[in-house]
Image: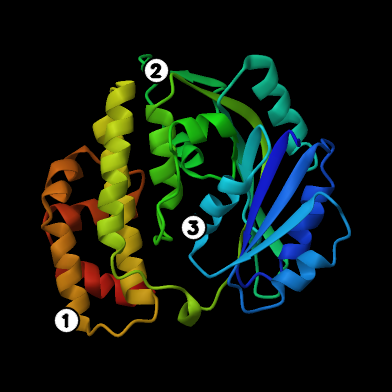
Amino acid sequence: MPKVSVILPAYNVEKFIAKSIDSILSQTFTDFELLVVIDGSPDNSKAIAESFADPRIIIFEKENGGLSDARNYGLERAKGDYVYFMDSDDWIEPELLEQTVAVLEKEKRDFVVFGYIQDNEDLQGNVFSQQQKLPNKELLSKGVDYGLTTDLLGILGYAWNKVYKKAFLVDNNFHFEKGISLVEDILFNSLVYKQSDEIRIINKTFYHYINRQVPTLIKKFHQNSFDLNLWKLERLSDFFESWDFKNRKELLGYALVQGIRYCVHNLFSFQNSLTFTEKRMYVKKMLYHPKTKEYINSYIPNGKVSVFYKSLIKHKNYNLISIFAIATK
């Protein structure tokens, strides 16, 4: 049996999946299986995956169910002691599996977290800048107040910068929420953290998250984006409460404002059929929601734009937020 199962969902990634698979096959740790889950993809992703002549690659094909469903599908079929969920349009450093497995085995961990590099690409696919997202701690323990930072919270959110012990996920019935494609990672990980007493972090960047310049017209509009962010707030609140973070209200205020800002951007910048009045009423609904009232005063801005945005939310100025969104899209 392989030590690690790498789960790679694939949907419309024919331009990127070869580089992803190459980076997996180039791992210095070789005792793994690669489960490529073709999630009803209409392009040539499957053919490209099949072109790799490596017995560790196992290709599954299923009806399209979204990223969460594809990850769950892979987890159900994984044979490794550990599982790693990777996105098929990114790539990883050669030492990722070797160094994470070493910590997991030596310290008997249920999961491990690591940093990543955001590669910002232009429309031609050239990297013009990079941002290193490196954790500043090696271990978090439940009940010890660390004053969790917003930067570290962001790193804790993703699934692709974690390697998990499979038995830990299966025994606790952890799975990704099917049918959503916006906050699925943090919904999953919040439950993981709530169930755990420690979070082990490796202060190295093994993952390359590719930030591509995608034309606005083909970006996905989520009409239920605010409801999903409220769900995220609920899960985060449970996690923070169980760990007794003293600054949990500030963290929830941050998550609230970031969620509202994303929803506004999603509403006014991504193609949809809503009229301006309907969009304005959507913003009004967010600003008048009880959770917004509960957490907005706890939000600590970190710049002039953030101060301005907090003021608009606090005073429920949905008209100005809507106009500002149009002017800056």
Whether 271 is drawn above or below 166: the answer is below
Whether 139 is drawn above or below 306: the answer is above
Q: Earlier in the sequence, mark 2 or mark 3?
A: 3
**Picture coordinates of residue 210, whole percent (x, y):** 63, 58
In the figure, residue 122 lies in which quadrant?
Answer: bottom right
Q: Is mark 1 on a helix, strand or loop?
A: helix
Q: Can residue 157 be seen in this view?
A: yes
**Distance from the alpha carbon under mark 2 to that under mark 3:** 30 Å
In the picture, measured across the screen, residue 119 lies left or right of residue 324, that is right
In the figure, residue 178 lies in which quadrant?
Answer: bottom left
**Distance from the alpha carbon under mark 1 to that under mark 2:** 46 Å
Q: Name the residue under label 1.
A: 277
**Picture coordinates of residue 207, whole percent (x, y):** 67, 45
**Picture coordinates of residue 106, whole percent (x, y):** 69, 16
- Disc number for residue 224: none
Q: Is residue 278 or residue 81 the one in the foreground?
A: 81
Label 1 crowd (10 A; few <14 / some 14-19 / many >=20): few
Q: Is residue 230 or residue 166 the one in the foreground?
A: 166
Residue depicted at x 60% and y 69%: 11
**Distance from the alpha carbon under mark 1 to that under mark 3:** 35 Å
- Disc number for residue 69: 3
Q: Name the residue under label 2.
A: 142
Residue depicted at x 21% and y 37%: 298
Three-letter amino acid code of the residue under disc 1? Thr
In the picture, measured across the screen, residue 196 lies left or right of residue 311, that is right
In the picture, measured across the screen, residue 144 lies left or right of residue 286, that is right
